[in-house]
Image (cartoon, rainbow, N blue to C red):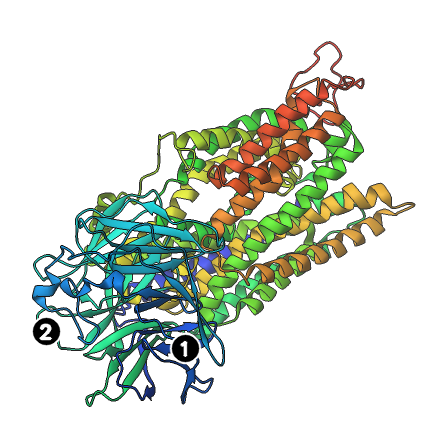
Amino acid sequence: MSQFSSAFALVCRGVRAKAVALGLCAGLALAAPLQAEPLTPLLAGTLPALDTSAPLVGMATVDGRTVALTRDQAWRLDAERKHWLPLQWTGAARAGAVIGDGTRAYLLPADAQANAATSESAPSEAVPSEAAASKTEPSSAPATAPVIARLTPSDARLDLKPLPPLPIALSSLRATLSGDSLFVAGLAADGSAHLLQRPLADEAAAWTSLPGWPGAAAPRSLVAQTRALFVIVADPHGGADRMLRRSPENQWSEVSRVPGQVLPGAGRATGQAHVLYPIIDPANAQAAAKLMIYQTITGSWATLPGAQVAAGATATASWPDGLMWARASADGQRVEFATAQVQARKLGLHWLDWVVIVVYLGGMIGIGLFFYLREKRGSTSSFFVGGRSIPFWAAGVSLYAANTSSISFIAIPAKAFETNWQYLANNVIGVLGLMFVAVWIVPLLRRLDLMSVFSYLETRFHPAIRMLASALCIVVQIGSRMSVILFLPALGIATITGISVFWSVILMGGFTIVYTAMGGMKAVIWTDFVQVIVKMGGALFAIGFMIWHLPGGFDQYWSTAMSLDKMHTFDFSFDMTKATVWGFLFLVVFEVVLTFPKDQVLMQRTLSTKSDKEAGRSIWAFAAITIPGGIIFYTIGTSLFVYYKNNPERMNPLLPIDATFPMFIAAELPVGVTGLIIAGIFAAAMATLSGIMNSVATLISVDFYDKLAKNRTPKQSVFFAEVMTVVVGLIGIGTALLLSKFDIHSLFDLSIELAGLLGGGFAGAYTLGMFTRRANWQGVAIGIAASIALTLGIWTLQMVHPYYYLAISILLCIVIGYVASLFFPAPRQSLNGLTIFRDRAVETGIGNRE
């Protein structure tokens, strides 16, 4: 017990130090004034003028080439952005406007806008007049269906590639690009609103008609952002424009009143949840347009200082991190260009923040070194399961720490910020599953004295099933968990400190490798204990800080959250494309009850306890923390929503949604507290990473090395385990760096998706082994292979919500595996102690029982 006393004393000293620091930082936070200036001002710039008196049709940037064109001429801006170079251009007599997203561009036909002057300005006018803006009924529609063409520039020429004609002639045409789809909006001859969509990857694809927005208001702007479409329509009385949103379910709703009027055809999506618009004052149509950012999640508007769109602008286009626009010169002989780019301020750390971070990292290394020097590891049992001497309460806290990684600390607040508390229902229902696991599953496996949970599959079925399932588990842990868990905090730390994602991944992964390889499972569990205190303390402080700095305090937080349904938790609908209560009930049966046995990371902590009764108690301790812990992380997301709805100028429109909480930490929290919460981000990631490294090293060592290596000694096995810990950590670092190369909307959803696609098959094998007597190894092997193949097919067709993939995969494995087992002989060995069905007559006990 002396080693635990020493470790606990070390933990307590760390807790007292953190408590003092937290109290000091709380005083600083309450005294700190709220920063009100915009976080991201604009940088104004100019481009060379173009010598032409012809009206400009539009401009765009395509694959790094910025082009401008009239109906008869086209130019390309040179690489130094000093001169406009003429391009071969056959011209398009019916060219009307250009739309693009910075990499692709399309030419809209002029005849589709023949009546645009009735509801918008002519190209030579800066803004629509009040009378024109109030007119929403179209004039005569074009006689023939318009054709949209893709612009393809080269160094010498500009080519057009026509798309199939639109199925209906539209006026007031607007268009936007979203992923691999082109959306087109406009009014038909009868004044009805129409929305068309066409996939761009398939040249033979036809246009699809989608429900148009309500009313007959002509669209000023169409922008795709945050999985939705945003249409700006004119007010019939010439006042401020209205913003309508089309959800992914084809439902239209009015979400905002624009603080003015949007320049026709303007609007540029930035980041994952913002749109940049040039806005004019209806009472002063000849004034410059201010640039405003719209936050699609909070529905708030903020003005970005530093640049304005000059009066008389005739066209706008996407520009890197901003907009470009053009207008005719005063003498009408040239076209002048200007740009505005969003500038993200550098948010560095104070030296006190670095001190807190260094103390935390040093403490983690210290705990690993303590157990490395203290333990005489002559066997893998000491390294992998802590000599089976861990108290149940420490194992329970460690279980929670391993289950609440950086996904919980960063991705779940981002999910709650974007949506609501719907995913918390999984935590609530999951506790019921944990109760079943504590009573039936964990004691059964603990009595077998395993180190690898897949040893059970060998005893119950066949060595090949054990090795197959173990290999799949290794792939899932490294591919779908380690990579995401490393990348998420790296994204946050890069946002906060300015350190690149690359070095953040190296830093976190490197420190975790060191203390895990040195201290083994004991270091993992006791560092988990400290890390839970650090990250939960930081989370609670952040919630209090946000609510404290709201003008209305907690009352404003509560009223805003409730009025917008941001704390909605239980969805009882039967829509399988959504995360509903029924889906969670279905999922918990498969994800908790049936998959807990195959989760080496969690099971290894319960296997480290003193007895099967202590193992069950560790699950009860884990369940007791799960719901309050989940509420804390979802409350962070709701607090972020209310805070940024009240302070929209403090958001960075260039960042992804998953960076919302790290951005808040960097920009708003006082000195010292920022370092504490960064330590919490480290803690959230490193607690899970250390467990994964140790667990995967266990699987490689016990399931493969010990099975294949000949004449090995216990010391060689321990050394091999230490080496594998380092190797697994390095592979995880590599996969995280690979993941950073992709633009992913929600890493929380990605982690669920990958685990479901790859992790369900071998989970079904445990179900067949524990809950049936008839299943055999041949049927289980067929079930695993078939379930993975069929689940990948369902994923390809996108038939259901990703949350169902794991349950579907397990169910397929169970059904197919059991049916296939009927075609092979029943198991002949004794199954006593291997299933939940006990043979009381011959029960003699396996391992130690209480």
- Residue 6 visible within the image: no
> Is label 1 in contact with label 2 (beta carbons under 8 Å)?
no
Residue that label 2 marks: 284
19 lies above or below 304: above
Under tag 1, what secondary structure? loop
311 on left or right of 829 = left
Amino acid at pointer 2? Asn
Q: Amino acid at mark 1?
A: Trp
Q: Tell me residue 307's x, y (percent).
A: 26, 79
* Residue 107 on image: x %, y %: 36, 66
Instruction: Locate the N terminus and report the quarter of the image it occupies.
Output: top right
Q: Is residue 141 left or right of residue 725?
A: left
Disc 2 crowd rating (10 Å Cα; few below 14, some 14-19, many 20+) is: few
Position in image of residue 570 (x %, y %) = 35, 34
Q: Taking 207 as reference, is 805 above or below it? A: above
Secondary structure at numbered mark 2: loop
Residue on which disc 1 sits: 89
- Relative side of 495 to 285, left or right: right
**Residue 528, visible in the rendered structure:** yes
Q: Residue at x 60, y 61 (%)?
A: 738
Judging depth in this view, the residue of 309 and 16 nearest the camera is: 309
> In screen coordinates, is 801 left or right of 339?
right
Quarter residue 238 falls in: bottom left
Q: Give the label, 1 or 2, closer to the camera.
A: 1
Marks 1/2: CA–CA distance: 38 Å
Closer to the N terminus: mark 1 or mark 2? 1
The residue shown at (60%, 47%) is 525
Q: Nearer the viewer, residue 820 or 72?
A: 72
Which quadrant of the figure contains the C terminus? top right
Q: x and y percent of residue 343 in the render?
A: 36, 75
Residue 449 sits in quarter? top right
